[in-house]
């Protein structure tokens, strides 16, 4: 999972895909968030470009979460906000810089 672009933030995060919380290695760049199974995994498992997503915070079943929702509909990525508070701030900042407006929060 290498890129020539500078990394804003990286580390293991709790993601919810469908029904289960899983730990994945996420990398935040200025224009996108990508994640893989682990730091050494070269296969990208998910990619969210900030020109195509909306970011918000929500509460689901008493859990604070960060939602990344594709504007085209359908796919949603959830990040555990309680465990990863700094991610929302960085995601929001990157998205604001790309889209020129603030997503809901």
Image: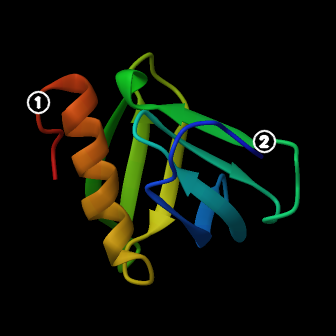
Identified at 43% across, 55% down, the residue is 8
Image position of 9 with respect to 18: above or below: below
Identify the element where label 2 is drawn: loop
Residue extending farthest top = 72
Front-most of residues 83 and 42: 42
How many other residues sit within 10 Å of disc 1, few (<14), some (14-19) or many (≥20)? few
**Closer to the N terminus: mark 1 or mark 2?**
2
Image position of 10 with respect to 62: above or below: above
Identified at 37% across, 82% down, the residue is 82
Q: Is residue 86 visible?
A: yes
Residue corresponding to mark 2: 44
Q: Is residue 20 visible?
A: no
Image position of 63 with respect to 76: above or below: below
- The spot of residue 25 in percent (x, y) is 69, 64
Seen in the image, is 62 located left or right of residue 19? Answer: left
Q: Quadrant of residue 10?
A: bottom right
- The spot of residue 35 in percent (x, y) is 67, 51
Seen in the image, is 36 located left or right of residue 47? Answer: right
Residue corresponding to mark 1: 101
Identify the element where label 1 is drawn: loop
Seen in the image, is 39 located left or right of residue 91? Answer: right
């Amino acid at each position: 999972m290498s890129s020539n672009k500078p990394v804003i933030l990286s580390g293991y995060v709790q993601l919810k895909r469908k029904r289960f919380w899983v730990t994945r290695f996420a990398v935040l760049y200025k224009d996108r968030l990508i994640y893989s199974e682990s730091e050494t995994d070269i296969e990208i498992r998910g990619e969210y470009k900030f020109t195509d997503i909306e970011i918000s915070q929500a509460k689901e079943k008493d859990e604070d979460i960060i939602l990344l929702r594709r504007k085209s509909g359908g796919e949603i990525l959830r990040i555990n906000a309680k465990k990863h508070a700094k991610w929302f701030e960085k995601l929001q900042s990157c998205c604001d810089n790309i889209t020129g407006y603030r997503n809901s929060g």
